[in-house]
Amino acid sequence: MQLSFSIIVVESDLDLMDNVPGCRMERIEKKQKMKKMKKTTEKPLSQFQILRNSLSDEEDGLLESFFKELKSHIFLSRNERASFYKDFENALCFYSSHSVTLTESLRRLDPENLGGFYARPPVLWFALDDAAKIYPLSMKHGQMAVFRLSAYIDGPVVPEILQIALDFTIKRFPSFATTVKKGFFWHYLDTCKRHFLIEDESPIPCRPFPIGRSGSQSFRVIHFENRISVEFFHVLTDGNGGLVFLKTLIGEYFRLLGVSFSPSDDVLDVNGQPSESEFSNEFHKTCDDKGASGFFNKSAVQLGGKLSSARPCRIVQFRLDSDRLCEKAKSYGVTVTSYVLALMFLANKSAGDELRGISSIQVPVNMRRYYPSKTVRNFAMYCGIRIPLEEINELSEVCNMVSRQLSEKSSKLMMDRMMSETGHLVQMLRFVPLSIKAPVAKVIYGFAGDNVFSNTLSNLGLVSLPYELQKHVISMDFVLGTALNNRASCALVTCSGIATLSISKMTYDPSFEEKLYSLLLDEGFCVEAAGSEEA
Amino acid sequence: MKIKIIYPKVSRHRTDRRDVLNAARWPFIVLGFASVVVDLCTSGPSWSLVAVWSLWMLWSTFISTAMVEYNRISQVIKVFSDSCILLILINLFFGLGWMSFVVPIVCFGGLVISGILFFTDFDRQKQNLFPLLLLAIVSLAVSIAGLCIASNWPLIVMCAVSFGLIAACLVTLGRDFPRELRKRFYTK
């Protein structure tokens, strides 16, 4: 920059000297030389150009035909296409710097992996499933149901490769490559063919998505050090669907890095054909069972502390040995979820000043347990475990109470009731225009909101990966986004022998996590506490 | 409890839309309420409705903007249709007689502008057809109803423009048109 500036100064001096007779020709030559110099100094060769210059004629021919083939797979705007080319150039440079041969690089980056996704006009659209319908109705500026799934890998993330992995993976999940749109009666997802870009991680996880613009997306792939994360607006999928996407993305990432493995049911083949069952609204499958569903309940006692303006204001994670966690849960004769819930009830009690009232924890229930399904859309319901504060004393007692309630309330019968009630509600409202439904839903949600719960625990369970991938994945975490009034939301996931309990905080009061930490220490766990700074 | 920081460093809090919303909410409510009270006390023409509607326009256009479908076509249509309602209110409450003349002009102006925005970026804006179509259909219905009562040139132009726009959408979208309607009107 400095150099080109000095050249401009010299040039202007030459312009002045043009008036001096006798020196004109010499000066013109000098001027032309300067111009040439300026051209070369202003546009230094890109890394890709340097790579290209170093190739033999044969290799250059290979590269040219590669980009021709790439062009035939992308029918997007000129800018978007250029952005795709840039991705592939960056990936080729990365391979070259890591001594991967050109032939091998081109094999890994084969444009056939893009399929026809970017070459065909968008025609698909997806009606929202029954659970997703509430999310666009209840969202507000700065308040959106977003969750994050992350995988920690055994080395720093290579952004160039992650970007290509996303380019190849997204076509396998057409319901994710969509924009939320407004219909006359309901919102829906409209396919959006564009270049989806990876992003650097921001300090506050689960930021709301700006979904209003044409072609805006409802998911983001982010990276930080050795962590690959995907954040989803809940309208697209639930934790299990999101996990399938993350695993497939990681699989593709490692394939591009030369790891070979066989695709499975939850690490999909990116070149496979998406089936209709992957996008079906499975809520229609369930039995029509009438009865009290537990939808409506009295307000629960909230944790203490003022709600923060930044939401979540902090993420705290406890990493535990998963075998030890299972052993401990077994020693109380309960499941891991019940055991962690019991600990949370004790921590809830000590994180507030209330002496009376009901403490309640929301527990999402994966309906695939009862209705095997391949859907990557939402297919989860929830139940509420409620215990009066006066009865929360001994861990073993609380474990028993929680276990009893959990097995009863998350039973197939209760879940069927809740789903059929959801279905009836959707049926009832289906002919009410969205312009009427939306403000009413906002008001109702604003009043009721999440007041019936004090906290949430979403347990994704044990995440398994093919052995070849498992070797490279150190652990995973699952972070829930903002709630309206709940001061904390917890999520648990187990991978590679590490159970990670993430707490999303909506208050600066540290009582809850401190109590939970001390309870875990008392239980004999070796706890590794990690997280974010306070926002 | 020692927490190992594994997230990016938190930067200084920047003002976001929620802060603006929180700051602007009460002044807007107070202004709206005050105008109604003053209007009731002075017992003149009901100008407070015009004031409240103008405040609503400001609020929904600049402060609490739409979260879904916040695109240029729907914004243009929103501004023009809100302006039409404002003009109707002004005309009704101040006893002016230009409503049947001015409103159609504003309305077909809005149709023309959004039509230009739609057809000049057709591939991308195809997804934003619905608000344009809705305004065109409403304009057509209103202009036909208006022409049955009294005929003037703005109404004739509005009728022609809205009809032309609907026809152009039908022709250019072809087989996509019924699909677009199916998406927009699904009920399940």
Image (cartoon, rainbow, N blue to C red):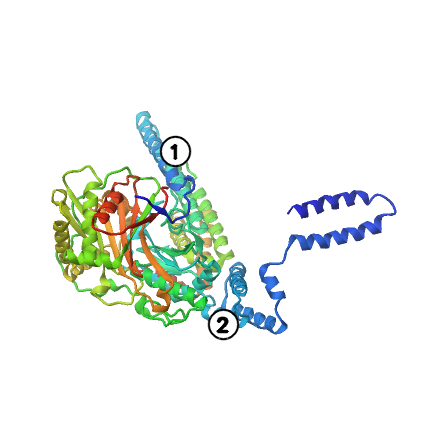
Q: Nearer the viewer, residue A264 or A448?
A: A264
Q: Quadrant of the C terminus of chain A?
A: top left
Residue type marked 2:
Arg
Count how many numbered circles sit on residues in the image. Answer: 2
* Residue B101 percent location from the top left of the image: 45, 43
Q: Residue at x 46, y 45 (%)?
A: B106
User: Considering only vertical position in the picture, is A342 above or below B32?
Assistant: below
Where residue A226 sits in the image (x, y, percent)? 41, 56
Q: Which of label 1 and label 2 is nearer to you? A: 2
| Residue furthest out toward the right | A22
Question: For the point 25% across and 56% down, which residue is it?
Answer: A459
Left or right: B115 as drawn, with respect to A12: left
**Quadrant of residue B37 within the rendered picture:** top left
Q: Position of residue A255 (x, y in %)?
A: 43, 68
The residue that disc 2 covers is A107
Secondary element type, mark 1: loop
Mark 1 residue type:
Phe
Q: Is residue B167 visible?
A: no
Q: Residue furthest top?
A: B42
B90 or A5: nearer the viewer: A5
| A63 lies above or below A210 | below
Q: CA distance from mark 1 to mark 2?
A: 75 Å
**Residue A470 can be seen, yes or no:** yes
The front one of A385 and A51 is A51
- Which chain does tag 2 point to? A
Question: Mark 1 — residue?
Answer: B94
Label 1: chain? B
